[in-house]
Amino acid sequence: MTKLFEGIHGVPHAEIVVFTKDDEGPGAKGIVYNTLGLPLDFTDDQFRALDPEALATEFRGDAVWMNGPRRVLADSVSVELFDEGRVTSVDGIAMQTIADVHVPDLEAFLSSQRPPYTQLLVNRTTMWTFRKGRQVHELISPDGHVFVMQSLSRRVDPNLDPDRLATLGARLSPPAGWEYRVRTLEEDLLVGARGDAHIVLDEFENNYQRED
């Protein structure tokens, strides 16, 4: 089931990722539950109050990663929903399954020492649209790939909002060869993925998807 969500720039959203450890090795598979496109019947504080250990037990996982709260930066998104769009209550917050992800080392991923600017493959089908005239925020990797920020995170900095992103570059410390760029679009920008979405998080856990 594919849905189009429009008028979403600046809209609050959040997600949890329920991880189940691999039978062998340190890796784990995660199922991604997200509020995108659903009624805004939750607050940042309500999301922060969720208990990841209790959720892991409820969802029969080994661990839960709390991803957010966030603000969307795209103007619209087309997303293929898993489970025919079934809505799941996450302690009273409505979410849908939109992706799955595999991490090679679950303990390292969940630790506070998780390295930013490390590419992560997320299995999802999405098309983010940023309209002409919109200011976009990008990371350019040493090999020239452009990663467009699709949403900002308020987990590390609870006061971060779209208006403060123009000066975010002064607060980032990317590895050598990486560049943070802000530009105003002269035409619509489409950032899509069918299957593997290449994702990078900065040290504030802002989320960037590679433009392929």
Image (cartoon, grey):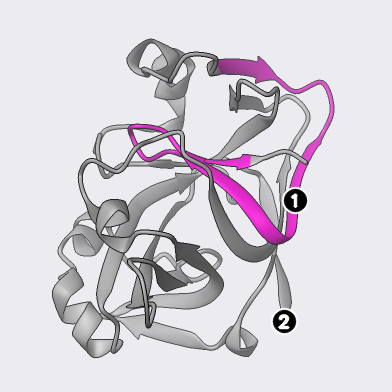
Q: Which residue is mark 1?
A: 192
Nearest to viewer (mark 2 / mark 1): 1
Q: Is residue 204 magenta?
A: yes
Q: Is residue 134 above or below residue 123?
A: above
* Residue 67 appears in the rendering: yes
Q: Which mark is residue 1?
A: 2
Nearer to the camera, 51 or 187: 51
Under circle 2, the secondary element is loop
Question: Quarter holding the C terminus?
Answer: top right
Nearer to the camera, 54 or 49: 54
**Crowdedness near tag 2: few (<14), some (14–19) or many (≥20) residues, C-alpha within 10 Å:** few
* Residue 7 appears in the rendering: no
Residue drawn 61% across and 43% down? 209
**Percent of width and height locating residue 54:** 15, 80
Q: On the image, which quarter does residue 35 sit in?
A: bottom left
Three-letter code for the amino acid on which mark 2 is drawn: Met
Under circle 1, the secondary element is strand
Q: Which residues are magenta?
A: 180-209
